[in-house]
Every structure is written in structure tokens, then in C-alpha cells.
Amino acid sequence: MTAELIDGKKLAADVRERLKMEIAAGQGEDLPVLAVVMVGENDASRIYVRNKQKAAAEIGMVCEVYEFAESIGERALMSSLQDLNDNPHINGIIVQQPLPEHIDPLKILAVIDPAKDVDGFSPTNLGLLATKEPQAIVAATPKGVLQLLQSTGQELAGRHAVIIGRSNIVGRPLAMLLLNQDCTVTVCHTKTRNLAEIVRQADIVVAACGCARLVKADWIKDGATVIDVGINRVEGKLCGDVDFDAVKEKAAYLTPVPGGVGPMTVAMLLENTWEAAQRQFREGKAGSAAGHGHHCSCGHCRS
Ligand code: NAD
């Protein structure tokens, strides 16, 4: 069997096109605004942020970057986040990680207004996801993985999904998301014994461990669906956590790296921001034109 590749690039382009049309059609409403908070200097973070800005601009979304010095204290950062929470023009807030050592990311994430927490990393949104509340904002990468799975048209209920990785940004929220889809979920990690044996039982394998080509073809049940979240650089080339060339001959569906989960992550962040903005517009909490009935000169609003 040769796997059908799941084209994340195409799926993400479709999502971005839809968002662009919806935002353009929102006549009379404010433009959605995403605030990206960056602390200190980090080359990788800068590239990620630039990509997010570019992707936002392409769909007509405003992306404002708030940069803080490496030396900023935890309290000062929390207070700046509170200002962003209180700013009615801002619909989504993300804090680019990693943060400097002296700042506790959990404390910072807990300050973000759950309605604006478009990364879905705040304890409130994780709790809403865990309790299957529909208003949960779901982290972009797990949400992208679910949409990639759904794009194959297969029934998810009752399937055994094995996730390799238990990080707060991928493995854990994905476990809850797939449980909410009625999958039977197993989460594996560095202390898991007999990893290969467990993966062999999976109808769906999601590799999110950051180990280049860890998942071998003889770990894969014939006809399984394999989603590769990993991004690794080996001899200057990008590869995932799955031994792609060999696994391709065993799986029914497989995502490539690059061109699988990566593009979906950015598209899902934009989708989360647009959905949060729409909720805020509806509830009259955001912006000025629609919600508060006065003319605004902030430069973002259409009024
Ligand atoms: P992380 O380092 O925070 O977590 C890795 C997890 O994998 C841990 O829970 C660990 O227990 C587990 N693990 C590590 N080695 C293992 C092994 N040999 N066997 C079993 N479990 C093992 O990483 P993360 O932030 O969750 O990211 C995981 C990978 O996904 C990385 O390659 C990262 O670059 C990539 N990633 C990609 C996207 C995307 O958009 N495509 C988004 C986020 C992360």
C-alpha cells in the first residue's frame, strides 16, 4: 500500500482564502486585530512572528507586535498583558515562547483574557477543552491535526489514536481533542515502555516528540493514518518524527514534512483570532464601530 499524502499546504490555503473572504465581507465591522507579545531577542521567534504577520496581512487581519526587553520583570509583563486585555481594539493575544528564564510562562498565560487567548494555552481554555465545552479556544497545532484527520473523511469515533508526546502545546491538548471526538486515546512519552508495540495497535498515529524519523515502518499497522507534527533539521534538511519514505509504503494516509501540519498551525491561529473577533463583535465588547457606536480613528477600524 502506498499512502495518500494529506496536503496540509492546500488545506491551509483553503482556510486562509475562506477567512479572507469572510473578513472582507464583514462590512461595517472592525478589522480583527492580533497582538503578538515578544520578550527579548530570539532569531527563531522573530522568523515565526514575521510569518504570522505576513499570513495575517494576506487575509486582511491586523497583526501588532509588542516587543519587550529581555530584562522586563514578570509583574511588568503581566501588567502590559492586562492592558492588552483591556484594549477593545485587540481581539487576540499570543505570547511568543520561549520566554526568558526569570519569567514563568504559566503565570503569564493565566493573565490573558480567555476570550482573547487565541493560542488556547491559558488554564481556562485548557479546562474548557478538557470538559468538552464548545466555547474552548483550541490550540492551533492540535486543531490543525484534527482538521487534517477530518479531511480524509474517515470516521474518528472508536478509532485507537496513539499520540507520541505529551507537551502542553501539542500532545496533551490533542489527547483531549481526540477524546472529544470519541477516539480511544493513548499518550506515549519518554518513559513509555514498548513504544513500538503500542504504536502497532494504532489506527491513528500522531508523532509529536521532536525525534527525527523515530517512527519506523514496522511500527505501523497496515492502513493506519499517520500525522507527523515533528520539525527536525538533519544535515540542513527538514524532516519529521516519522521515517517518511518507509512509512509511506505502510500507511493509508500520511502528512509530509514540510507541507503537512506546519501550514495548518498558522491557518488555525488566524481562524482562532477571526472567531474570537467575531464573538467579541457580536457581544459588543470589541472595537468601536460596531460595539460602541462612536467614530474611531485608530487606523484599524473601518468606520
Ligand atoms: P516538547 O519537546 O515540548 O515535547 C516532546 C514530547 O515528546 C515530550 O512529551 C516527550 O516526553 C516526548 N518524547 C520525546 N522523545 C521521545 C521518545 N524518544 N519517545 C517517546 N516520547 C518522546 O516538544 P513539542 O513542543 O510538543 O514539539 C514536538 C515536535 O513537534 C517538535 O519537533 C516541534 O518542532 C514540532 N512542532 C511542530 C509544530 C508545527 O506547527 N508543525 C508545532 C509545534 C511543535
Image (cartoon, rainbow, N blue to C red):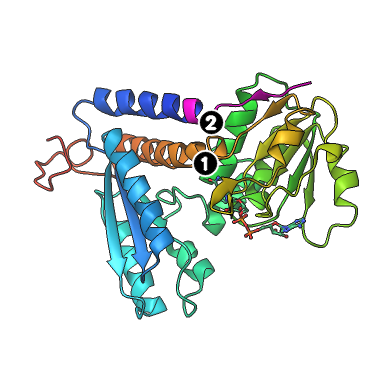
* Disc sitting over residue 8 in the figure: 2
Q: Which comes sooner in the sequence, label 2 or label 1?
A: 2
> Residue 269: which quarter of the image?
top left
Q: Is residue 135 above or below residue 27?
A: below
Q: Could you tell me which secondary element the residue under label 1 belongs to?
A: helix
Do we see residue 154 in this rendering?
yes
What residue lies at 29% left-to-right and 29% top-to-bottom? 23
Q: Nearer the viewer, residue 65 or 294?
A: 65
Q: Could you tell me which secondary element the residue under label 2 belongs to?
A: helix
Residue that mark 1 sits on? 262
Q: Are marks 2 and 1 in contact (CB under 8 Å)?
A: yes
Left or right, 18 with respect to 195, comes to: left
Residue segment shown in magenta: 1-10
**Kind of residue at badge 1:** Gly
- Residue 5 in magenta? yes
Q: Is residue 177 above or below residue 20?
A: below
Do we see residue 182 in this rendering?
no
